Amino acid sequence: MQNNVANHCPKCCATLWMSRTIAMPSEKPAPEKLVGALIGGLAVLRYLAAAQAPVGVSRIARDLALNPSTCFNLLKTLVHEGLAVFDETTKTYSVGLGLLALAKGTLEQASYIAMVRPHLREIAVNHRVTCTLWHVMSGERVVLVDRADNDAAIRVHMSIGQRLPMYIAALGRGMAAHSGLTTSELRSRFIKLRWEGDLAFDTYLAEVEDTRKRGYAVDQSHYVRGVTTVSSVVLDARAKPLMAISAVGFGAQMNKADVRALGGDLRDRAAAISFAMAGQHRPRS
């Protein structure tokens, strides 16, 4: 599985995607009148899609030979339309989920992983946790497809390609909340799971219901002692679990307020990603 993930790494896919897109116009005669602003905007969008990290406006303008003021206005427009994301802290831009909504149905897994990655980075930095992205696979299992770390000297590390049972830990409660399984069916899956801390099925079931109501799940020292995991599920157009975003940290470093803030952030981002995966824009407030 690790080889498969490496073969479809976001870096390679982003570069190949950009190369294919740039090459396409030369295959057909150009229209009589080209819209310069649109060409510039698409150039910036392709640049962001291929970038391996958020980029500042000065570098984008320089690399694309654009007027800095023009480049800035193009970026502001892309952010407004949800096609780019602006980080106030670093003053940098990255590709946004709006592109995913536009390209729904044509993107490979690695492509949408690249568009979710800025969210993983922001969660990891803002909440000082390790943020992970899990993808649902066959056999009721999930696989770790991406990860963002914080800069803490001691932090939780997880390996890309790692697999887990679908209903374990915090992400498992989220999966269970949207699974449509009966109590009996869920119990049969629960008894096969291994937990480090004692966890009764009735407690697990109540926490699944809490997850359904508040939009995020929490596991505190049940799956791994001393570790707190908070997770929210990304749903497809049929409201079925597709991915889960999970934040992992040491329980001693996270109080109740920290967990609530982290959970709310995960819930809101997972909802926005779910809208994009369904080919929709979430209404702007």
Image (cartoon, helix red, strand yellow):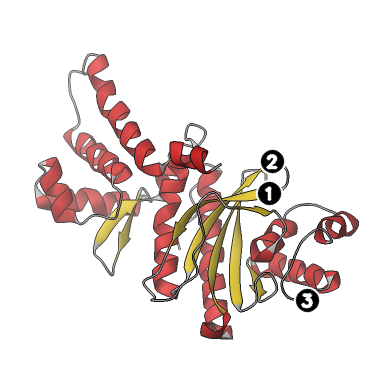
Image quarter of the N terminus: top right
Residue on which disc 1 sits? 141
Q: Going 26% across and 23% down the picture, which residue do you hit?
A: 23
- Which of the 4 image quarters holds residue 192? bottom right
Q: From the viewer's perspective, is 163 left or right of 191?
A: left
Residue 198's label in the rendered image is: 3
- Bin the neighbour count of mark 2 within 10 Å (Cα to Cα): few under 14, some 14-19, many 20 and up: few
**Can you see residue 8?**
no
Q: Judging from the image, what secondary structure is the residue with disc 1 in?
A: strand
Q: Position of residue 230 (x, y in %)?
A: 59, 69
Report the residue marked by disc 2: 138
Query: Disc 2 marks which amino acid?
Result: Ser
Which part of the image, by quadrant, shows the C terminus? bottom left
* Dot in front, 2 or 3: 3
Q: Earlier in the sequence, mark 2 or mark 3?
A: 2
Residue sticking out furthest to the right? 184
In this view, the residue in front, 173 or 189, is: 189
Residue 245 drawn above or below residue 16: below
